Image: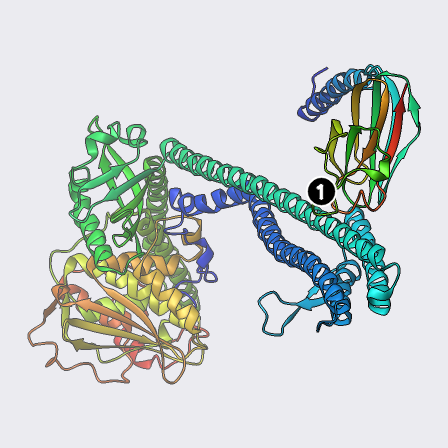
């Protein structure tokens, strides 16, 4: 059967769509099957102005902090090892932010600004001890954005 | 007066005339751009709207981007100002609590306003000042709105803490905690405000970036569309040129461009088919080198006239062009003066080969002539027989019948002679000796059936060159018969003459219903430009015969309206055909006006003197009885025409 030009065009279009599907489906499946990183998961929620943790004690070793910003303000998350109480961290001279270089404060790691509905995973290998998680943007710590975590 | 000089002449038929100047390539060439325009229009039809849409979209997006940029800048300014107002409020509260002059209330109100405007929409003072205010639309992005709502909550909280400080002062036991709380809230507000400004800035940048990308895409599409348009135009132009070349190259007609000096500037390749010559060989030579020597004068006259005419004028001519093998091709040319057109700069000739038509016309003319000659011989014999019977007949009634037969046969003979004239073959009998003009006029009158209604008066004693006598008599007979045929039987037709500066004019006046201006113009055109024999001519034989006979001898014939009604036919005999019978025409006494002269009487009287035999074998009246149904006074004619026998 002799194909008209219109039929050939439709055939090309169909072939293109099928090829696109054939490429897209495996990519989607592969993305969904990403391997879960190891470690004890801890869900952290940052919101004005508190830090929420779904666990107060975790086993020593790899801890996977799954941090989610709930806003409305942009926040950061700083993890320090200290034996001080969470609300008793030393402040800098401005009286508004924590002095992370003060004695008794060991900075472990941090997550930079997370805006509303943003997520980030922080994987740390934590030794046993007491830890404080807080946001050190001006006024946020003093506003109540801190939480403690014990690693046993 | 007559609608045409003979009874066979039908209604005017301008449509029968060949469409001079608009045939062959002459028709095709002006149409080419139209065809091209239509095809081009169809192809470009979709490109032009697309271009317009693209340009409009670019302009629209550009305008939107500019507006958005201005609006975003204002929003950022407003958000940033709000942060400064928070700091000012905090400072005012602390200063006031310390007992110094400050107005924290005013600062608090000012601090609220930007947030309210950004959230709910409104107007703010323009950054440039001048008291003008600029409207700001409510924020639509949910992230920005949540930050601004938080901002508003914190401001409210800040004001509450500020109020507590202002109310309690240093004496308040919670003074230190309130101050700290004030500073913390202020810091949080700064943080939120920073966030909001950053968010708005990011969104503005993203939006502008999106607009720029769209504009770039649209611009690229426009460039592509413009390129496509250019390609289509180029292709269409090339196709038009190819189409034109194909038409010109494959046409059976020639297109020749003559330069101002008469040389051929361009020759279409089809000349090889027509004349067996290569087009390149003809460029540079003059057209006259190809034209038959007998036709060169006509061609030169036509071209010279055209060069002197207005730009765009056309002219037609026919001639013979020499084939490479030496034979001659009959051609018809339509010539257009495009000397003022810089693309042509010359005369454009559309030449069509009509050799076959010419041969066909010649054979038809020969056929016509041969048939007419045979009929002419038979009619001559019939006339001789009738003449013999008339001479021997004494019974008036039978003689009258014989006269009527004689006239009918005479008319038949003239019709046959008309055919010979139209055939184009010139086989007339010629007399070397001059003939009295009056004899010729009267011979013409004698050929007309209603001869008795014709008054010949005022014709001078001139002589007419012998070689023109028969044709002039024939010509006059046609005009006189036409006059009698198209006027009332009770009226007369007057034939008179008078000298002019360049010859002698014979006037044939009737008192008929006349002709309209259009009919008169058409008749004069036929008289001035007799056509070749064809079907149209057969229906308008009289005018064409008169025109042809006149053209043979340089005679001009023209019809005019009569001031008293009817039509006057003017026949201008050139001086070269005229001679004097003794005196100058102007001095020769004409026959007194109003005197009726019998044609046969005068013929009989003059024939022997000149030796010229009238064309028609006239029925001679040898008795006084007038012909039935013939008006006018015939006494004189009867008397003068008394038989000799």
- Horizontal side, residue B374 vs residue B556: left or right: right
- Horizontal side, residue B188 vs residue B566: left or right: right
Q: Nearer the viewer, residue A137 or B436?
A: A137
Q: Name the quarter where the C terminus of chain B is drawn.
A: bottom left
Task: Place residue B465 in its image quadrant.
Answer: bottom left
Task: Place residue B435 in its image quadrant.
Answer: bottom left
Q: Residue at x 17, y 56 (%)?
A: B467
Q: Nearer the viewer, residue B359 or A48?
A: A48
Can see residue B41? yes
Q: Position of residue B536 (x, y in %)?
A: 43, 52
- Horizontal side, residue B482 vs residue B294: left or right: right
In the rendered image, the vertical position of residue B50 relative to residue B463, given as above or below: above
In the rendered image, the vertical position of residue B284 relative to residue B490, given as above or below: above
In the rendered image, the vertical position of residue A65 relative to residue B482, given as above or below: above
Q: Residue at x 40, y 32 (%)?
A: B246
Q: Nearer the viewer, residue A43 or B251?
A: A43
The residue sitting at the left extreme is B582
Q: Name the quarter where the N terminus of chain B is drawn.
A: bottom left
Per the image, label 1 sits on a secondary structure element best described as loop
Q: Residues within 10 Å of mark 1 (few under 14, many from 20)?
A: few
Residue located beneath label 1 in the image: A92
Q: Residue at x 41, y 54 (%)?
A: B17
Q: Position of residue B581 (x, y in %)?
A: 9, 72
Task: Place residue B508 in its image quadrant.
Answer: bottom left
In the rendered image, the vertical position of residue A71 relative to residue B239, given as above or below: below
Can see residue B394? no
Q: Position of residue B347 (x, y in %)?
A: 26, 48
């Amino acid at each position: 059967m002799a194909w008209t030009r219109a039929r050939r065009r439709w055939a090309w279009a169909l072939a293109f769509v099928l090829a696109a599907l054939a490429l897209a489906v495996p990519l989607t499946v592969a993305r969904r099957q990403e391997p879960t990183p190891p470690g004890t998961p801890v869900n952290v929620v940052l919101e004005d102005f508190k830090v929420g943790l779904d666990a107060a004690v975790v086993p020593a070793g790899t801890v996977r902090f799954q941090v989610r910003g709930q806003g409305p303000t942009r926040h950061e998350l700083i993890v320090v090892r200290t034996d001080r109480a969470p609300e008793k961290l030393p402040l800098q001279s401005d009286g508004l932010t924590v002095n992370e270089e003060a004695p008794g404060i060991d900075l472990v790691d941090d997550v930079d600004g997370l805006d509303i509905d943003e997520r980030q995973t922080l994987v740390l290998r934590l030794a046993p001890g007491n830890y404080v998680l807080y946001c050190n943007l001006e006024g946020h710590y003093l506003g109540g954005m801190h939480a403690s975590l014990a690693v046993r | 007066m007559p609608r045409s000089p003979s009874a066979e002449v039908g209604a005017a038929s301008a449509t029968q005339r060949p469409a001079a100047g608009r045939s062959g390539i002459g028709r095709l060439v002006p149409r080419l751009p139209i065809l091209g325009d239509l095809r081009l229009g169809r192809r470009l039809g979709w490109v032009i709207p697309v271009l317009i849409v693209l340009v409009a979209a670019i302009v629209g997006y550009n305008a939107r981007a500019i507006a958005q940029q201005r609006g975003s800048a204002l929003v950022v300014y407003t958000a940033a100002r709000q942060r400064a107002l928070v700091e000012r409020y905090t400072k005012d509260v602390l200063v006031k609590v310390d007992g110094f002059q400050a107005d924290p209330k005013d600062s608090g109100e000012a601090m609220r306003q930007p947030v309210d405007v950004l959230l709910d929409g409104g107007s703010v003072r323009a950054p440039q000042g001048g008291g003008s205010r600029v409207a700001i639309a409510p924020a639509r992005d949910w992230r920005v709105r949540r930050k601004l709502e938080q901002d508003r909550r914190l401001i409210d909280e800040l004001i509450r803490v500020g109020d507590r400080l202002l109310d309690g002062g240093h004496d308040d036991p919670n003074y230190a905690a309130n101050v700290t709380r004030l500073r913390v809230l202020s810091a949080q507000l700064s943080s939120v405000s920073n966030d909001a400004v950053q968010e708005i800035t990011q969104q503005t940048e993203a939006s502008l970036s999106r607009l720029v990308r769209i504009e770039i895409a649209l611009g690229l599409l426009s460039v592509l569309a413009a390129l496509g348009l250019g390609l289509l135009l180029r292709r269409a132009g090339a196709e038009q040129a190819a189409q034109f070349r194909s038409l010109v190259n494959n046409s059976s007609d020639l297109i020749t461009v003559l330069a101002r000096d008469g040389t051929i500037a361009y020759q279409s390749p089809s000349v090889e088919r027509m004349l067996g010559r290569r087009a390149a060989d003809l460029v540079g030579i003059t057209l006259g080198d190809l034209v038959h020597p007998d036709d060169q004068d006509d061609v030169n006259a036509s071209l010279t006239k055209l060069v002197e005419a207005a730009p765009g004028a056309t002219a037609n001519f026919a001639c013979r062009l020499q084939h490479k093998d030496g034979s001659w091709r009959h051609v018809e040319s339509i010539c257009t003066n495009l000397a003022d057109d810089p693309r042509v700069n010359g005369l454009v000739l559309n030449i069509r080969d009509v050799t076959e038509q010419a041969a066909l016309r010649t054979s038809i003319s020969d056929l016509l002539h041969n048939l007419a000659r045979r009929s002419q011989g038979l009619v001559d014999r019939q006339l001789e027989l009738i003449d013999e019977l008339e001479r021997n007949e004494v019974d008036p009634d039978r003689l009258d019948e014989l006269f009527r037969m004689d006239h009918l046969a005479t008319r038949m003979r003239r019709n046959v002679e008309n055919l010979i004239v139209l055939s184009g073959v010139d086989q007339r009998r010629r007399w070397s000796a001059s003939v009295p003009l009056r004899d010729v006029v009267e011979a013409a009158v004698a050929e007309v059936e209603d001869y008795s209604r014709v008054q010949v008066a005022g014709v001078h004693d001139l002589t007419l060159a012998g070689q023109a006598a028969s044709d002039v008599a024939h010509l006059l007979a046609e005009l006189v018969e036409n006059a009698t045929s198209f006027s009332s039987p009770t009226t007369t037709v007057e034939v008179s003459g008078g000298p002019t500066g360049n010859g002698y004019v014979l006037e044939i006046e009737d008192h008929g219903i006349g002709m309209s201006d259009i009919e008169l113009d058409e008749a004069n055109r036929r008289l001035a430009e007799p056509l070749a024999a064809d079907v149209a001519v057969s229906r308008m034989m009289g005018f064409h015969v008169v025109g042809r006979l006149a053209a043979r001898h340089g005679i001009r014939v023209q019809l005019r309206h009569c001031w008293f009604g009817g039509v006057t036919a003017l026949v201008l005999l050139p001086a070269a055909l005229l001679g004097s019978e003794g005196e100058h025409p102007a001095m020769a006494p004409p026959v007194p006006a109003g005197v009726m002269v019998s044609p046969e009487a005068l013929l009989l009287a003059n024939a022997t003197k000149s030796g010229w035999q009238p064309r028609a074998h006239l029925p001679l009246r040898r008795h006084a009885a007038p012909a039935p149904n013939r008006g006018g006074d015939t006494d004189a004619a009867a008397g003068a025409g008394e038989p000799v026998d």
